[in-house]
Image (cartoon, helix red, strand yellow):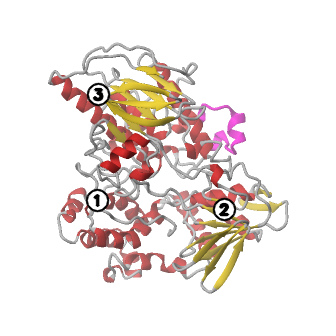
Amino acid sequence: MDDAPTVDRVKSRITGPCLPHIDETSLRPPATCPVQRGLDRTTLIAMRQEGCGQETAGRGTAVPRGGFSDHQSQGSRMARVAIVGTGPTGIYTFFNLIQADPSHHITLFERGEKAGIGLPYSPEAASKSMLANIASIEIPPIDATYLDWLKGQPDAKLRAYGLDRAELDDRQFTPRLLLGEYFRDQLLSLLDRHRARTEVLETTEVTDVIARNDALFLRADEREFGPFDRVILATGHVFPDADEATRSYFPSPWSGLIQAEVPPVSVGIMGTSLSSIDAAMAVANQHGRFRRHGEELTFEPATEGLHLTLMSWSGVLPEADFWCPIPYEPLQVMTDDAVAQCAAQADPLDRVFALLQEEIAQADPAYADRIGLATLTADTFGDAYFAAREAQDPFRWARRNLEEVEHNKAHQITVPWRYALLRMHEKVETLVPHLGDADRKRFDGGLKKVFVDNYAAVPSESIRRLLALRDAGLLSVLALGEDYELKREPDRTVIHAKGKTHVFPVFIDARGQKPMESRDMPFPSLRRALMGSKQDIPELDADFALVGVPDYDRHAHLAAIPYLMHDRPFVQGITASAEIGATIARGISQAVGDRAAQGGGRSSAPVVATG
């Protein structure tokens, strides 16, 4: 896929030890299991499959709003923690904090009306037709697994989302809106069980983070909350506001598109990823309906004049999500130690590519021979990887790929080279902070695109919908090349590419989240401190705590994914949120424990709101 943003390399910004990235098959221990550190994926999934966990207790009691109550310390291990944002990252951080040490006093701030529903899973950003590309088996459980939660929902609710109870399974892709409901239920259940030391403030938008007297305070609704020992900024994705959209231009699929009435005209969609497919579905569903006849899916238009065009540099479509063993089997060549040795060399990118060559050659010799892997480099592998797809009609390739994927799923067949790449992307990500400017540019232009295409495979149903729209004559794909020109005009968007001009009365930019820098920080006091510390990109330790920023140093943790994308180019999705939350919780609990052991516990002044 080539619509992922390219990031200019500035310098290495992770000052602590490099953390292994946990991909979308990694899991944290369930709520009723003892907190354990360093568990591998096999152990974590085995714990869940053996039933370590409990059924959700259902929705909690009414969520309190307003100021804080006074809480007295039960010992010097208590930390006063604020979590800003209650999407998946905020919830997993909260969950791991109370698992690590239930004596912490934790307050969650949510600017929306309902805590626990992250933006991608909210009615403002998703419709029932938009599928999540993660299944229950991949979602780290909290109180209940996602599948168990689904099984506990009423039949009418499942039918409303197009689900059949008899067909529910742990590898099924479901609407994103259901995931939002799941996370809200999990949060409320946690709050209900730990109400004595936790609370959440809804419709409370934090507008500043202020450092004073060796503590942090939050500004929200013209009031000041605090003091806090630690503040965790889990503010999630950042997309343009809906008021930046017009009748002819949407700066992202999450900028008012769901609520907009799009006329039946030529609609251009920048990108070919799942976000782009979601944008196409949001428009198509306004002008017709999908119908299923047995295994066949068709689209029946209700208006005339609509045509959708997905576009990217290469014009390739994503492939359908493929079958593979979960938990992951260990790699044979690209081990943690082998990658660490690469990082210590003068040519780390070329060294790690040599590991990739050997791993694929062992796993799938036929594929290695077919693409001439032994003759390729880190710079040419991407061209060989995409060559066959770029040479064919994208919809013909999509049909063949869908048939292959569905056959493999039915017979539990794994394509070895695909599986090897999937397991290697998280290993390679640990190397990225060690790449110099030249190697980072090479990586972004080559291997990064391969890994993104491989792990960002989409639900088979999304491919079926694209093919149904194509068969109805309503969808095409445009390969722009790298030298295209895009011009926005008041009532249309004009694109010049490969000697042709394309005009779109409606245009949607669906290229996804872009990396954010210190200057983008929405909290003015913290932004000034970062810029004053000459940190164009926030510098973080291994626990995602800010370092080198006076007064905020190791008091504020930056868990917002847009600010982590510079050194962790594959950070995305729910499992990344779980990893970040677990890492922050371990760091805070360890630091508080060390302070208590040294007799340096802070006195338990009450947390209050003033204003």
- Is residue 165 magenta-colored? yes
Residue where numbered disc 1 is placed: 433
Q: Which residues are magenta?
A: 150-167
Name which residue lies at 24% across and 68% down.
348
The majority secondary structure of the magenta stretch comes to helix
Residue pushed farthest left? 598
Location of residue 280 by image quarter: bottom right
Q: Is residue 351 above or below residue 542?
A: below
Q: Secondary structure at mark 3?
A: loop
The three-letter amino acid code for the residue at tag 2 is: Arg
Q: Give whichever of discs 3 and 2 has the lower sequence position.
A: 3
The answer to whether residue 171 shows anywhere in this view is yes
Could you say where residue 388 lies in the image, as x and y percent from the top left?
51, 79
Q: Nearer the viewer, residue 594 or 40?
A: 594
The three-letter amino acid code for the residue at tag 1 is: Pro
Residue where numbered disc 3 is placed: 213
User: Which labelled disc corresponds to residue 464?
Assistant: 2
Location of residue 317 by image quarter: bottom right
Q: Give whichever of discs 3 and 1 has the lower sequence position.
A: 3
Badge 2: residue crowd in 10 Å (few <14, some 14–19, many ≥20): some
Q: Is residue 450 above or below residue 252?
A: below
Could you say where residue 404 lies in the image, as x and y percent from the top left?
56, 67
Q: Secondary structure at mark 2?
A: helix
User: Which labelled disc corresponds to residue 50?
Assistant: none
Q: Nearer the viewer, residue 329 or 62?
A: 62
Name which residue lies at 31% across and 15% down.
73
Name which residue lies at 66% across and 62% down.
464
Q: Nearer the viewer, residue 281 or 164?
A: 281
